[in-house]
Image (cartoon, coloured by chain):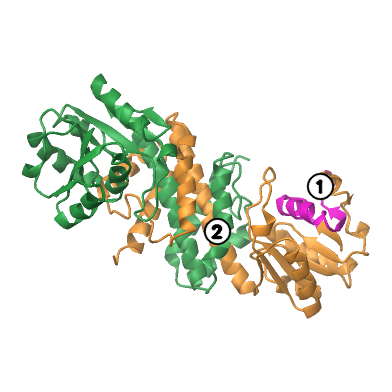
Chain colours: A orange, B green
Amino acid sequence: MRISFIGSGRVATHLAHVLSISHEIVQIYSQQIEHAQILAQKVQAQAVNQYQQIDQNIDLMIIAVSDQAIAKVIEQLSIYLKDTLIVHTSGSTSLELLTQYHPKSGVFYPLQTFSLERDIDWSNTPLFIEAIEVDDLRRLTDLANSLSNHVYLYSSEQRLSLHLAAVFACNFSNYCYDMAKQVVDAQQVDFGLLYPLILETANKATQSDPKRVQTGPAVRKDLNILDMHQQMLSGSGRDDLKQVYALLSQGIIQRHESE
Amino acid sequence: MRISFIGSGRVATHLAHVLSISHEIVQIYSQQIEHAQILAQKVQAQAVNQYQQIDQNIDLMIIAVSDQAIAKVIEQLSIYLKDTLIVHTSGSTSLELLTQYHPKSGVFYPLQTFSLERDIDWSNTPLFIEAIEVDDLRRLTDLANSLSNHVYLYSSEQRLSLHLAAVFACNFSNYCYDMAKQVVDAQQVDFGLLYPLILETANKATQSDPKRVQTGPAVRKDLNILDMHQQMLSGSGRDDLKQVYALLSQGIIQRHESE
């Protein structure tokens, strides 16, 4: 397939890279031409920063930009790409946002966390596909199957609830690590001491119901410790962390109240 | 060494089990004799539920009970064990709580999350040791070194800040998994789809600064998505999760504000 990208961020970079193995990446569009050039060079594509420059002789256009920019992008693209299949890669944007401008649209959503410095294990990354026309669905499914062993046809509603869950499971758990690091950093204690705990907690959650394996002072209703920890946070001027501590502890207590 | 335990919960069970390989576990005390019996049988020890029954001919007594019960236990033990080294296993209880009743006291704190159904990788579990007398410190260090490659002499203050950080890194991240599961369960979507994301997020945190690899709508300041997610949670009657979503997103935004 001949494939182009709108966007040159983390998702575009990882996806263009893996797709370039078996497909031709034609163009990388970014408003900032320098950003487009960095990715284009890696996947031997052309960098562009004007919609008029877009090559119409392609099989698939992948929009990999922030959610709030998708509407503006599809409005422009629909002018220059009449019969080309266009997909977005977002968890929380409905297919309808594309189809209202461009009927031949779809979704190609990888449920993964992307950092520029880390390789992605694509074969184990769940991919969620959506399209209106059966032909498009088939082409997207074939493309997805060539990357991953876990391809699903999900509605926009299902994809949305997955993405919301992913914010809790991934973005918020990472922020918990970040808050933990701030606590030990303030005492010149090495954050690396927490690595075994972080890994064991994550592994456990993939093997047991996280509710059942919840540990800590909140689920034990150890009010003395809960109090002391909040006083420590307050005392070191971290009322922001104290607020998080209080709300999450209260949530854990209520969640296990009936036991 | 001849070692006895006060307590028969998760920490006592895992610790008695691994120590029984090279040492003699003499007695397991629990107020509920049936609980003591379950663990005692596994490590070929005697189960007791009266302080008067405690065998004084031991080298080490390990208190592995909830933090709020430690004071009452050491008060009783100090009557029956005059010259025996007594340690607790808590992250958030100071050594002083023991020494005010019993000078020959110490701390033996494993920084790990314990579930009954899962084996512990002791060699990679950090152990934190504290004692007043040099001889006691040496014996505890030898014992710790026989279990783990990561033994540290930490003050009560350092241990306390580690334990507080562990609540964020472990207990709260597990609660994030639990909340994620509640979100997908409500839509009959499989929680297992999030496993690759959970594991990648945890692995990433042990290889990069979690602040630097933060992803998601909050760090992107994608206000439309933040709004939509909170409306979804509200709309499905989960104002509790909405509150958590709002507070953590706000925390992430503020943390990255200066960038």
Q: In which quarter of the image is the N terminus of chain B?
A: top left
Question: A198 or A221, which lies in front?
Answer: A198
Residues at marks 1 and 2 on the same chain: no
What is the x, y in percent for residue A167?
55, 58
Seen in the picture, residue A221 relative to A239 is either above or below; the reply is below
**Tag 2's secondary structure?**
helix
The nearer-to-camera label among 1 and 2 is 2
Mark 2 neighbour class, 10 Å CA radius: few under 14, some 14 to 19, many 20 or more = many
Using the rendered view, name the quadrant where residue A25 is placed: bottom right
On the question of residue B153 being in view, the answer is yes
Chain for numbered disc 1: A
Q: Quadrant of the C terminus of chain B?
A: top right
Residue A28 part of the magenta-drawn span: yes
**Magenta stretch in the rendered image:** A6-35
On the question of residue A244 being in view, the answer is no
Mark 1 neighbour class, 10 Å CA radius: few under 14, some 14 to 19, many 20 or more = many
Residue B239 part of the magenta-drawn span: no
**Badge 2 amino acid:** Tyr
Seen in the picture, residue A244 relative to A155 is either above or below; the reply is above
**Residue at which label 2 appears:** B195
Question: A235 or A83, which lies in front?
Answer: A83
**Residue at which label 1 appears:** A39
